[in-house]
Amino acid sequence: MLIRLLRANLRPYARPLLLVVLLQFAGTMASLYLPSLNADIIDRGIARGDTGYIMSVGGWMLLVTLVQIVCSIAAVYLGARIAMGFGRDVRAALFHRVGEFSVREVNSFGAPSLITRGTNDVQQVQMLVLLSCTMLVTAPIMCFGGVVMALQEDVQLSWLMLVCVPVLVLGVGAVILRMVPGFRVMQTRIDEVNRVLREQITGIRVVRAFVREPQETARFEGANAALTDVATHVGRLMAMVFPIVMLVLNLSSVAVLWFGAARIDAGQMQIGALTAFLAYLIQILMAVMMATFMVIMIPRAAVCAERITEVLDTESSVAPPARPVTPAEATGVLALRGAGFSYPGADSPVLRDVTLTATPGTTTAIIGSTGAGKTTLLGLVPRLFDATAGEVAVDGVDVRELDPEYLWSRVGIVPQRPYLFSGTVASNLRYGNPDATDAQLWQALEVAQAAEFVRAMPEGLETPIAQGGTSVSGGQRQRLAIARVLVRQPQIYLFDDSFSALDLATDARLRAALRPVTATATVLVVGQRVASIRDADQIVVLEDGAVVGIGDHHELLATCPTYVEIVESQFSAEEVA
């Protein structure tokens, strides 16, 4: 998965990557050339007392060092740009893919996991790309070049490389193999911490209302401790890597000096050559250490790449039509014909055999007990999820065949739990129509019975709104959400229990103000209070996902026992009569 993700997203950066390789090659070769020049200064300059030679070769060393510095800086700069571009592209791909998901896929992954995959997971793979451009490219060049240059200095000591390098690889490799499972567990523990933290921040009012702070603190501490335990275990293993590297490095230096001194004493080797050989051996071991460090990063990046690819490979259950249809005439007629919906693996469907028609200029109310499938029914219209049986048609065309832009432009929904975005009142209202004027915004607020409290706000339309609309009350949030839909002016209005937080007087005024605005539109209203929906043109009664009655208030009182039960639970016998 990691190779596939890198190949797919680094293809646009092929030329910069090639330039990084060339720069790293030039910089590494310059670094490898310096010990050889240093050996010449010792053997030919210092040993002979030739100051001119020392100055000449020293100047050449300065030039080579300058080349090394310039190439290294340029390579790191380009590598950083490539890594940042890679991270940007992957995050954008994740964002667009999640934007295509239906409610089913979002619930399957979970919001905390999707957030972690789009931030922490991408960052881990991005860091791998950066280190690859700076270390992984350099390591093999330095290792191979170091071996060649060391052999040029003295072949007889080369057996030390055959001992030191495998010992280093085996010692570090044993530690890394034990770290890989820990990285996999760590990412899931990060998901868990995000989930708990998100729940507690979102539900802070509930936590305080039930005085559950100690329990929630304990729950967070449990998730945090679980992550800390895994991270500590992996950290301890990682901490063992550098002592192993330093031990092998120092023992190798001692061995070179020990055996090299004997060769110098025998006249088989010069001091400068020994110094150069030691420098090359250190460079080789450092290259192995850099490669090892990359190997440490690869397992965690591979786990993150799996999680990222899992999201990118998941197709939405609400797929856009291959040949989208745009109706010749926008009538606003909504029809459900034997529509049903069930979740994969569920024992029974949420909705089954729902048939109804809603036409412009009429209001269709949907009522039923909790869990009857009212919200699910409304979600089928804008394709928040697709019907698994039957069809849902808008303007005579199945919504699965309609052009998505056409469908969404004609449907406006106020969800059961209205959500406002961080910004201002105006920016939230213009979410449905970015070109709406202030006059249109105020008109929508007047209809939604929200103009009074918006005028009372310090900055009116420009008053800041907190994320989720937590800076306003539940009733104000509902009215602003209704105003947002009114600004859009769709042909089909879907109100999913959107008046539940309003008092009866405000509810009555809002419904009265809505009638002339929605007079030519198709309106579907999910309601719990009979008093607020009994004037609807038709009322649909749902029970266990099936339609058990359709008609107006008086017809249902005479023909639908389920509706009668609902009415009797809310009114006295005299009122029902």
Image: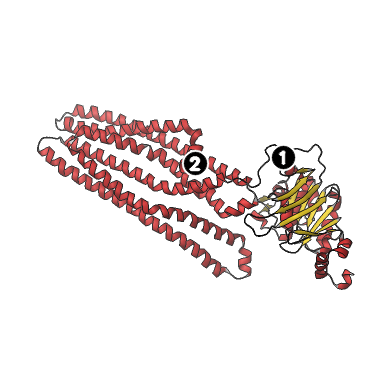
Identify the secondary structure beneath mark 1.
Answer: loop
What amino acid is labelled 1 in the image?
Asp
Residue 266 in the image: state x and y as whole percent: 9, 37
Residue 479 in the image: state x and y as whole percent: 76, 56
Decide: is 494 above or below 506: above
Q: Residue at x 74, y 58 (%)?
A: 374
Decide: is 253 above or below 54: below
- The local crowd at label 1, few if under 14, some if 14 to 19, many if 20 or more residues have their Cα within 10 Å, is some
Disc number for residue 516: none
Decide: is 267 above or below 354: above
> Between residues 344 and 236, which one lies in front from this camera angle?
344
Identify the secondary structure beneath mark 2.
Answer: helix
- The local crowd at label 2, few if under 14, some if 14 to 19, many if 20 or more residues have their Cα within 10 Å, is some
What amino acid is labelled 2 in the image?
Leu
Q: How far is disc 1 from disc 2 in space, using C-alphas?
A: 31 Å
Q: Is residue 537 left or right of residue 246?
A: right
Which residue lies most toward the bottom here? 573
Instruction: Look at mark 2 in the image and give the residue it sits on.
Output: 5
Q: Residue at x 18, y 39 (%)?
A: 157
Question: Count the marks: how many?
Answer: 2
Instruction: Look at mark 1 in the image and give the residue it sits on.
Output: 403
Residue 346 in the image: state x and y as whole percent: 64, 58
Q: Residue at x 19, y 42 (%)?
A: 256
Residue 375 in the image: state x and y as whole percent: 72, 56
Q: Is residue 299 left or right of residue 31?
A: right
Quadrant of the frame with the C terminus:
bottom right
Are the residues tagged 1 and 2 within 8 Å (C-beta)? no
Q: Is residue 210 left or right of residue 499?
A: left
